[in-house]
Image (tube, grey):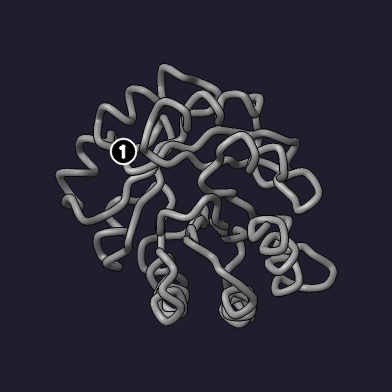
Amino acid sequence: MNDIPCQLYLISPLDVGGSFPDRLREALEAGPVAAFQFRVKDVDADEATRLATPLKAICDEFDVAFVVNDDVALARQLGADGVHLGQGDESLKNARETLGNDVQIGITCHDSRHLAMEAGEGGANYVAFGAFFPTSTKETVYRPESDLLAWWSGMMEIPCVAIGGITPGNCRPLVEAGADFLAVSGAVWNDPDGPAAAVRKFADILGE
């Protein structure tokens, strides 16, 4: 994750089988993407490994950070670049002891300044705030405002990720407020013109 004003952080759909590796490659070929998060639910470790392995290889090819959602053991097994933890997942301290200092650890902080400060003081590499907009990707309870990003970026050097219903049409205020990364899923994978077109739409805004 390079030190550039704002970058794209793709989050996988829940279904990453079938032709999805081709769609991921299409997205990464279309423009600069900083990270890709592997997020699947209700699959065992062997199946998760089978699904993740080709996706990690594609990310490695494009020098995109491969991040595993929730699963520290899987992140370690795959040699992932990072792991993203929610508030109910394994503790930051335990994850760091398991994965070492070279692996990026991100923490979901919802709309909470307190949780973000705790994560930063605990050694997180980034914090994630959201959902900023309605999203069908997962159930959302917290709805922060963009001034939370401005507060964090003005005070802390640790990057912040904005997440939740972000599209090319609504992301500009988040970028202007100081988001270091835009975490997007449906806006890319469900774009009627395909993932490459969606990435280019975001790149046009982030490159301004």
Q: Residue 80 or 118: which is nearer the viewer? A: 118
Judged left or right of residue 86, residue 200 is: right
Residue in the picture at 36% in, 51% down: 83
Query: Where 153 sits versus 79, above or below?
Result: above
Amino acid identity at mark 1: Ala
Query: Where 152 sits versus 157, above or below?
Result: above
Residue 141, by quadrant, is top right
Q: Could you say whether the residue bearing mark 1 is in a helix, strand or loop?
A: loop
Q: Quadrant of the C terminus?
A: bottom right
Residue 19, by quadrant, is bottom right
Residue in the picture at 30% in, 50% down: 72
Q: Position of residue 91 (x, y in %)?
A: 28, 34
Residue in the picture at 32% in, 59% down: 74
The residue indicated by pointer 1 is: 124
Q: Position of residue 38 (x, y in %)?
A: 48, 60
Residue in the picture at 64% in, 34% down: 131
Q: Residue 130 or 145: which is nearer the viewer? A: 145
Q: Residues within 10 Å of mark 1 (few under 14, many from 20)?
A: many
Picture mark count: 1
Residue 16, by quadrant, is bottom right
Q: Position of residue 44 (x, y in %)?
A: 41, 60
Q: Quadrant of the N terminus?
A: bottom left
Judged left or right of residue 147, residue 42 is: left
Judged left or right of residue 108, residue 89 is: left
